[in-house]
Amino acid sequence: IKPFDPHHVIHIKQTFSKLTKWSFEKEYRTHKFWPTKATVDDRCVKINSEAFVVLIFGEKTRPDIIKRLSGFAKNINSAIKFKMASKSSGAVTLSEFNPI
Protein backbone atom coordinates (compact mmCIF):
# COMPACT_ATOMS: atom_id res chain seq x y z
CA ILE A 1 0.00 0.00 0.00
CA LYS A 2 1.37 3.34 -1.00
CA PRO A 3 0.65 6.64 0.80
CA PHE A 4 -1.48 8.08 -2.00
CA ASP A 5 -3.30 4.94 -3.15
CA PRO A 6 -7.03 5.56 -3.63
CA HIS A 7 -9.31 4.08 -0.97
CA HIS A 8 -10.63 1.31 -3.26
CA VAL A 9 -7.05 0.21 -4.09
CA ILE A 10 -6.13 0.12 -0.37
CA HIS A 11 -9.26 -1.96 0.32
CA ILE A 12 -8.43 -4.46 -2.43
CA LYS A 13 -4.79 -4.80 -1.31
CA GLN A 14 -5.75 -5.24 2.37
CA THR A 15 -8.46 -7.79 1.57
CA PHE A 16 -6.86 -9.90 -1.14
CA SER A 17 -3.12 -9.81 -0.50
CA LYS A 18 -0.69 -10.76 2.21
CA LEU A 19 2.81 -9.64 3.11
CA THR A 20 5.42 -12.31 2.44
CA LYS A 21 6.51 -12.20 6.10
CA TRP A 22 3.14 -13.85 6.94
CA SER A 23 3.46 -16.57 4.28
CA PHE A 24 3.98 -19.24 6.98
CA GLU A 25 0.33 -18.82 7.98
CA LYS A 26 -2.15 -21.25 6.50
CA GLU A 27 -5.40 -19.36 6.50
CA TYR A 28 -8.71 -19.24 4.74
CA ARG A 29 -10.26 -15.87 3.98
CA THR A 30 -13.87 -15.30 3.10
CA HIS A 31 -15.28 -12.30 1.31
CA LYS A 32 -18.90 -11.81 0.32
CA PHE A 33 -20.61 -9.14 -1.75
CA TRP A 34 -24.23 -7.99 -1.52
CA PRO A 35 -26.21 -5.88 -3.99
CA THR A 36 -27.80 -4.00 -1.05
CA LYS A 37 -26.82 -3.21 2.54
CA ALA A 38 -26.00 -6.44 4.39
CA THR A 39 -27.57 -7.32 7.73
CA VAL A 40 -25.69 -8.89 10.64
CA ASP A 41 -27.28 -12.26 9.74
CA ASP A 42 -26.12 -11.84 6.13
CA ARG A 43 -22.56 -11.36 7.35
CA CYS A 44 -22.49 -14.56 9.43
CA VAL A 45 -20.61 -17.37 7.74
CA LYS A 46 -21.18 -20.95 8.90
CA ILE A 47 -18.02 -23.02 9.04
CA ASN A 48 -17.93 -26.71 9.99
CA SER A 49 -16.44 -27.31 13.44
CA GLU A 50 -13.83 -29.67 11.94
CA ALA A 51 -12.29 -26.66 10.18
CA PHE A 52 -11.07 -25.35 13.54
CA VAL A 53 -7.95 -27.46 14.00
CA VAL A 54 -5.41 -25.13 15.63
CA LEU A 55 -5.77 -21.78 17.34
CA ILE A 56 -2.52 -19.82 17.48
CA PHE A 57 -2.07 -16.97 19.94
CA GLY A 58 0.58 -14.29 19.66
CA GLU A 59 2.98 -13.92 22.56
CA LYS A 60 1.48 -10.53 23.47
CA THR A 61 -2.11 -11.81 23.69
CA ARG A 62 -3.60 -10.93 27.07
CA PRO A 63 -4.37 -13.92 29.34
CA ASP A 64 -8.05 -12.96 29.63
CA ILE A 65 -8.38 -12.99 25.83
CA ILE A 66 -6.63 -16.38 25.61
CA LYS A 67 -8.99 -17.80 28.24
CA ARG A 68 -12.08 -16.41 26.52
CA LEU A 69 -11.15 -17.46 22.97
CA SER A 70 -9.90 -20.90 23.96
CA GLY A 71 -13.18 -21.52 25.80
CA PHE A 72 -15.16 -20.60 22.69
CA ALA A 73 -12.88 -22.78 20.55
CA LYS A 74 -13.27 -25.84 22.80
CA ASN A 75 -17.05 -25.45 22.59
CA ILE A 76 -16.83 -25.48 18.79
CA ASN A 77 -14.36 -28.37 18.51
CA SER A 78 -13.23 -30.22 21.63
CA ALA A 79 -10.24 -31.66 19.71
CA ILE A 80 -8.78 -28.25 18.80
CA LYS A 81 -5.09 -27.71 19.55
CA PHE A 82 -3.62 -24.50 20.93
CA LYS A 83 -0.25 -22.99 20.09
CA MET A 84 1.66 -19.94 21.25
CA ALA A 85 3.73 -18.01 18.72
CA SER A 86 6.96 -16.40 19.82
CA LYS A 87 9.56 -14.54 17.85
CA SER A 88 13.30 -14.64 18.44
CA SER A 89 16.01 -13.33 16.13
CA GLY A 90 13.40 -12.88 13.40
CA ALA A 91 12.22 -16.50 13.52
CA VAL A 92 8.71 -17.44 14.60
CA THR A 93 8.34 -20.51 16.83
CA LEU A 94 5.04 -22.27 17.58
CA SER A 95 4.75 -24.16 20.85
CA GLU A 96 1.79 -26.27 21.89
CA PHE A 97 0.18 -25.29 25.18
CA ASN A 98 -3.00 -25.88 27.16
CA PRO A 99 -4.67 -22.58 28.05
CA ILE A 100 -7.59 -24.18 29.89
Image (cartoon, rainbow, N blue to C red):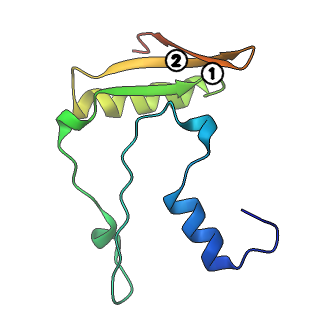
Residue 82: x and y, percent? 40, 19
Does residue 55 sit above or below 6 in this rendering?
above
Q: Residue furthest bottom?
A: 36
Quadrant placement of the N terminus: bottom right
Give me the residue at 45% from left, 17% from top: 83
Q: Which residue is mark 1?
A: 59
Q: Which mark is residue 69?
A: none
* Displayed quadrant of residue 78: top left
Question: Going by the image, does 97 lie left or right of 38?
Answer: right
Question: Going by the image, does 33 lie left or right of 86?
Answer: left
Residue 42: x and y, percent? 28, 72
* Displayed quadrant of residue 52: top left
Could you classify mark 1 by the number of other residues whose Cα lies within 10 Å: few (under 14), some (14-19), or many (20 or more)? few
Quadrant placement of the C terminus: top left
Q: Amino acid at mark 1?
A: Glu
Q: CA distance from mark 1 to mark 2?
A: 6 Å
The kind of secondary structure element at disc 2 is strand
Does residue 89 sit above or below 58 in this rendering?
above
Q: Which residue is mark 2?
A: 84
Question: Going by the image, does 81 lie left or right of 69?
Answer: left
Residue 15: x and y, percent? 52, 61
The kind of secondary structure element at disc 1 is loop
* Displayed quadrant of residue 3: bottom right
Question: Going by the image, does 47 lie left or right of 6?
Answer: left
Q: In the rendered structure, are the residues bearing label 1 and label 2 in contact, judged by CB atoms less than 8 Å apart? A: yes
Q: Amino acid at mark 2?
A: Met
